[in-house]
Amino acid sequence: MNTRRTIKVDSLARVEGEGALSVRIRGDRVVDVQLKIFEPPRFFEALLRGRAYREAPDMTARICGICPVAYQMSAVHAMEDACGIRVDGPLRALRRLLYCGEWIASHTLHVYMLHAPDFLGYADAIQMARDLPEVVQRGLQLKKVGNAIVALLGGREIHPINVRVGGFYKVPTRRDLAPLAERLTWARAAALETVRWVATLSYPKFEQDYEFVALRHPNEYPFNEGRLVSNKGLDIAIHEYETHVVEAHVAHSHALQAVLKDRGAYLVGPLARYNLNFDRLSPLAQEAARQAGLGPVCRNPFQSILVRSVEILYACDEALRLLASYEPPEHPAVALVPRAATGYGCTEAPRGLLYHRYTLDEAGTILDAKIVPPTSQNQKRIEQDLAHFVAQALALPQEQLTWQCEQVIRNYDPCISCATHFLRLHVAREDA
Amino acid sequence: MTAPPSPLLRPPRVLVLGVGHACRGDDAVGLVVAQRLQEAPLDGVTVTPTAGEGTALLALWHDTDAVVLVDAMCAGARPGTLRRFAVGTEPLPALCSGVSTHAFGVAEAIALARALRQLPPVLVVYGVEGETFETGAGLSAAVAAVVPQVVAQVRQEVLTLTARSTLHDLPPAGHAPSAR
């Protein structure tokens, strides 16, 4: 019999923002997948026009409460690119340290509170906490260490206020940073425990031939700088992004979908960074990944939780390294004079590449702005994962299939608030 | 494992949390109440405005003896309606902070803290029914009008709490400590 089914989730849980999923199945064929993002558009790019260049980091930080540092970092790098300056030395190190804090907090929230319950059959972290209180407790403490870094360098945990174009408003002394070292030493051990714990979860067998896109830096695991590379030959400078990536509007989503020209969907985020930069991870993170059963390449999106936990470990390790070598800079920021130019910035938000482009006039007023968040870039790829996953999982009972579809989406830790600038799921199987 | 109730050998640590978002209409009511309370500080009482992210709330009330939390709610009541919940003796109805798109808010923080046995010994939630949560709207007239009453009631609540030598005799649920 030719059967039609619909998988429908009207409000996706444990994702940031409002969205829904609809999958239509006819017989053994998936006929349509739509990741619908109905979080209202927020028009940030238009809001930025007419504002001063120095306002961009604080304004764009408001796009997201989870990854404000990413917005600040992409904004300051784009502005510095426009003004022709470079920020190096201790200021650059402090930016990396701040980013470590955001990765630790954001990834830990996702691993423990949003994603792990999927693998263990809990509806949410609250139910998980009843059975595994010490695990959830560890997650909460680990996240707090990430928040503490952001609070110390950024002035507060959410929407930090201490970042400026050229550097910071105020920089810490070695003594200011000292209490962080002890907490990070605990956090690094907790992160290692996290990798070991996550490695005990069982993952659905599912691999895809992705085009991974991430920053690649000559000698660092990427946060702020590098070239944009892929496993399929892309190797471009940040300013070439828009000649290779096109954004398209689709009727079912308020977020634009980004694709690579003539190539299609691509994947950004922890899996992409890991696959393209395994050799740049610290020895401790590499060793933990190997012991967890991860090779240098991972194509199973369900294992993104494991890769995310390796990145938490890396961020703790890197933060400790940065703390140990920190010497306060002479000035909290590099002086700059705005000029009429266009600047480009691309940094690695916890969820993947975050691209900013600004055109300024000679007084530094923003004439034009473009922001491409990670979830816009992953949207098309999430739909493809769903189509392929559902096709091989049709035998599953409806309830389980629906659950696993949600899990496919959560593999990406999508931030729908970012992409539009909440999630519902609909899987339809209907009789013909 | 649970120690028997014992008298406190020091003044209780009382924390008032004003939860909300300054730019989302009536969602700001918790912040406004916190600000008013800060204008006339009370001994032994910390007043903290917060966005109300769940894991941050757990961290904030760690190591406190009593917490009074003020937040906007949308429970379908008349705008400006004030309700008091003694958490621990009654389940918290779905409070709505209006704007949070994040997966983890006040209600989830309370449920998680309960699961982890990390609820403060006393947790009282004041919910103010909001009318509008529009961006940039400011407080509605109905909510602005109830602010003095919320401030007075929270102040009375913390005075009662700080005067106590033991925190195991909460007033009955839903019973405000001051006359309305």
Image: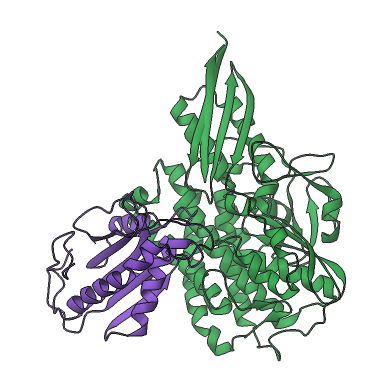
Chain colours: A green, B purple
Q: Tell me: residue A373, above or below residue A395.
A: below
Q: Residue at x 75, y 68 (%)?
A: A50
- Residue that extends furthest to the top in the rendered view of this protein: A1
For residue A398, side relative to residue A393 (left or right): left
Residue situated in front as seen by the camera: A283 or B25: B25
For residue B49, side relative to residue B66 (left or right): right
Q: Position of residue A407 (x, y in %)?
A: 52, 40
- The reply to whether residue A279 is in sight is no
- The reply to whether residue A339 is in sight is yes
Q: Tell me: residue A34, above or below residue A93.
A: above
For residue B123, side relative to residue B57 (left or right): left
Residue situated in front as seen by the camera: B121 or A289: B121
Residue situated in front as seen by the camera: B59 or B123: B123
Q: Position of residue B64 (x, y in %)?
A: 28, 74
- Residue that extends furthest to the bottom in the rendered view of this protein: A330
The quarter holding residue A36 reads top right
Q: Residue at x 60, y 53 (%)?
A: A290
The quarter holding residue A80 reads bottom right
Q: Residue at x 58, y 63 (%)?
A: A103
Q: Position of residue A370 (x, y in %)?
A: 76, 58
Q: Position of residue A310 (x, y in %)?
A: 58, 58
